[in-house]
Image (tube, grey):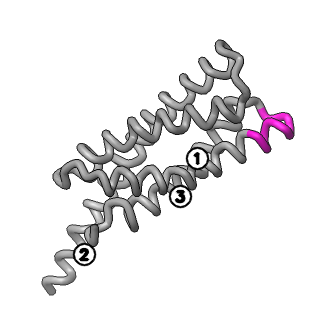
Amino acid sequence: MLRDVAVMHAKPAKVAQFVKFALVGCSGVAVNTAVLYVLSRRLHLPLAASSAVAVEFSVMTNYVLNEFWTFAGRGVCGKRFAKFNIASLAGLSLNVLLVWSLTRHGIYFLLANLIGIGVAFGVNYFLSTAWVWSRTL
């Protein structure tokens, strides 16, 4: 019975955590898109390099927001920050590959970027909950 109560309580908490993670991700989309646009269209840097830098900017802002809001109460941890960056590298790799590939096939670069962000989001959420902010840290 106690287990059933814990499971019922955990589900709303997991939903709230997912929503917070998604909202943080949305703020990261705004950061990513703005940085990508400035670097690639205003500063005329190569698209792949612009995308990589844009993703890293959003990774840094997302870590801070996730640390203090999504997974609040755990405190800053250098090991967790390093793990988050490693996990985000998987997302970065997918994002850059997708932006490059999709633009090669005629997809507008900002749309390709949003697709890359969506795929990376799924990978990042799984790694963040299962590894970066797992209770076994």
The x, y position of residue 32, in whole percent, is: 53, 31
Is 102 part of what is drawn in magenta?
Answer: yes
- Ranked by sequence position, the earlier of labels 1 and 2 is 2
How far apart are the alpha carbons under marks 1 and 3? 10 Å
In contact (CB < 8 Å): disc 3 and disc 2:
no
Q: Residue at x 28, y 47 (%)?
A: 67
Q: Amino acid at mark 1?
A: Leu
The x, y position of residue 90, in whole percent, is: 57, 55
Q: Quadrant of residue 14?
A: bottom left
- Give SS at disc 2: helix
Is 8 part of what is drawn in magenta?
Answer: no
Residue that badge 1 annotates: 92
Residue numbers of the magenta segment: 100-107
Residue that badge 3 annotates: 123
Nearest the viewer among 83 and 58 is 83
How far apart are the alpha carbons under marks 3 and 2? 24 Å
In contact (CB < 8 Å): disc 1 and disc 3:
no
- Give SS at disc 3: helix
- Ranked by sequence position, the earlier of labels 1 and 3 is 1
The image quadrant where one finds the N terminus is bottom left
60 lies left or right of 89? left
Q: Residue at x 27, y 61 (%)?
A: 12
Q: Residue furthest left?
A: 2
The vertical placement of 83 against 31, above or below, is: below
| Label 2: how many Cα within 10 Å (few below 14, some 14–19, many 20+) | few
Q: Residue furthest bottom?
A: 1
The x, y position of residue 117, in whole percent, is: 58, 43
Q: Residue at x 65, y 36 (%)?
A: 113
Residue that badge 2 annotates: 7
What number of labels is visible?
3
Q: Amino acid at mark 3?
A: Val
